[in-house]
Image (cartoon, rainbow, N blue to C red):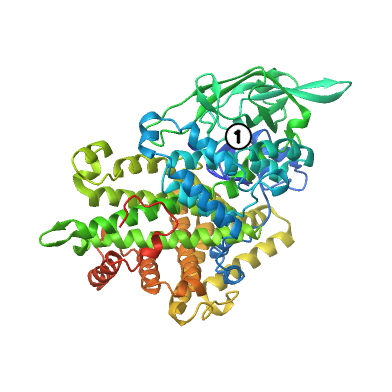
Amino acid sequence: MWLLDYPSQKLQVSGGRRWLISGQRSSKWWYGYTYVETQRHERNPYKDKASMKKQDVFQGSEVVAETARDKAPYTGFLAGLFEADVRWNLLASITVPEMSRDARQFLERFKGALLTLDPERVDSEGELPETVLKSLTAIGAFGIKIPKHFGGLELTQSEYQKIATLCASHDASLTVLLSAAQSIGVPEPLRLFGTEAQKAKYLPRLAGGEISGFALTERNVGCDISKVDTYAVRVRENGNTVAYRITGEKFFITNSAKQDGQFLASMLVVIARIVDRPEELHDPQAQKHYGAFIVETQWPGCSVTRLRFEGVRGIYNGIPTFNNVQVPVENRLGNEDDGLRIALATLTVGRLTLPAAGVGGLKQCLSIMRWWARRRVQWNKPIGEHTLIGEKLCRSAAYTLALDAVMAFCGAWANKKGDLRLESAAAKILGSEWYWDVVNDLFQVRGGRGFMTVESQRMNGEPDIPAMRMLRDARINLVWEGTSEILRIWMARESLAPYIEQGFSFLQGSAPDKLTAVGYFSRMALRSSIPAFSPGTGSGMFGEDYAAWVRFIESSARSLTRSTLTAAVRHRQGLHNKQLLLQSLVDQSLWLFPMAATVWYASQPDMRTKPGIRQLADYFCQEMEDRLHGSTATTGKQRPGKDSTVFRLSQSIMNGDYAWLEEGIIPIIEK
């Protein structure tokens, strides 16, 4: 499913905490970034707590959000940064995943199929050739993660990410089609929530090449998914529900429309509100139940219209419409209240495809930029020797290394079924924003040629570099599967969950709850101020080369915890309105997380031997340190000796010392 502004797993269901605002007639409940106002009496809100029942607290959308929210404590790496707990043990417990023999063989077959695809033709015609789709079906490309006993390849998440990187380096449209079909289409929710009978019915068809999608968003429903208007009316026989009749319209649904009136997907997972009568949709007192249904698009009542876009022009997004479509109860995934939970859970691992694709884009940009930086001469020397251009080369290489590291960590942790809820959101933000920065740099470095069409470049004897197409294709990454803004707000709510919960306990809890809250805040104050009270240190864990960065990350985590604690105490129930403050806290974690991942990645035995890896890892970490300390070009501050550092590193990049960074793609320029 293509989500223009749908943020992430547990987006507006990430809350359910009551913020009591003294002196106002309403109380606000914060669900991530969905704000729900409920009327309350003017009496003192702190009285009669013992008599307050759950149904008095949660009403309407609040009940839906609280039910769907994943309330499990965060055990991943990022959450610990907000509690001065750098969880080095998570990094120490994994290694960079290796590809299996089966995965390597498939990757070669997949590469061969990609080479028959002309991305410029896809861009101009807005279509993916049927011959390519058939060849992909023949090699099993639509069953990459489906178990072997259902006809799939059963590759791991980390192996799948390598495939996404290769594909994205060549064509964005095909990457989107394969991603939607496997990461958020029918296979993923079916794997997570389907019965054995449902898997046996549909997974072999999907592994055999049938295309699927995920239908959640609507014209007026992006972030606030509890406002879904598509509805499923129960069909009963002898008091039992035997089927549902689905009516409604979805919007921006990837893989749905081959053309107007013709579906590309043979099946969609459709999220719909379950009712007994359509009139319940307009009844504010009616309970809200949301279900997830596997809908076969050839069933009577299904129709579709295709949408067209300025970039990624070969994607098959559309507006599927359902008019009283009868769906057997056997095609419901989970229970009647599981629809939103299924939608949100599907995105946690599913969204990792986008940053994996970002790695492919970064590698391609680096490959082109270092070639052009040597070839193009201005003022009697290659443009890469001018440090303003050299800095762009260094940034491209540093982001490529760091995102590679982040994805290696996420892939390894996903293989172990670890908690990736925050990390997948962070990877999506970093991958989309870093790739956008670098593809802009590529455009700038190419100068006027970057604005030329590929056809014009060919006709005038120039190497055909599709900088403009890459720019158009990259822009949407900051929007779909969660905008950068929405994801930051969600990350803030989830990362600060312990502070919010303990603050709530202190304001409204029992005496023991208040003592627990005081203990928590005291512990955070000690951890953030005195290193000896921190849970542990990773000093020496990654070797002497990176010990200084380990210490820096730990001290920065303490600083982040102090800032978080100060913000929570100062703003209390008003904290959710301080979105710029919350963004600054999240951004600090977004700089520390890839630093830690890079240190871990660079210290791995197979990576230590890569030419120049320590220098590049140092450069990236120094860039993140500058951001944390406010030392940037925009503030007028500059790290001493940076010109010399950039010159030396850019020279090494141009000389091919970092060519290993470009592995795993189909290069546009053969050097």
Q: SS of the residue at dot 1?
A: strand
Q: How many marks?
A: 1
Q: Residue at x 34, y 53 (%)?
A: 365
Residue 213 horizontal side relative to residue 176, left or right: right
Placement of the N terminus among the 4 image quadrants? top right
Residue matched to label 1: 212
**Residue 142 higher or lower than 390, as above or below:** above
Q: Is residue 115 visible?
A: yes
Q: Report whether 243 appears left or right of 208.
A: right
- Image quadrant where one finds the C terminus: bottom left
Asked if residue 236 lies left or right of residue 498, the reply is right
Q: Position of residue 242 (x, y in %)?
A: 81, 25
Farthest left residue in view? 379
Amino acid type, residue under disc 1 in the picture:
Ser
Residue 75 pos. (x, y %): 63, 61
Out of 582 and 47, give the one closest to the viewer: 582
Toward the viewer: 217 or 96? 96
Residue 126: where, in percent of width, then height? 41, 30
Taking the spot 65% from the left edge, 60% from the top edge, the residue there is 416
The answer to whether residue 28 of the structure is visible from this angle is no
- Note whether 604 is above or below 590 in the view shown: below
Q: Is residue 95 above or below residue 277?
A: below
Residue positioned 72% across, 30% down in the render: 287
**Residue found farthest to the right:** 238
The x, y position of residue 203, in whole percent, is 69, 39
- To which quarter of the image does residue 339 belong? top right
Residue 171 shown left or right of residue 212 in the figure: left
Mark 1 residue crowding within 10 angstroms, few (<14) / some (14–19) / many (20+): many
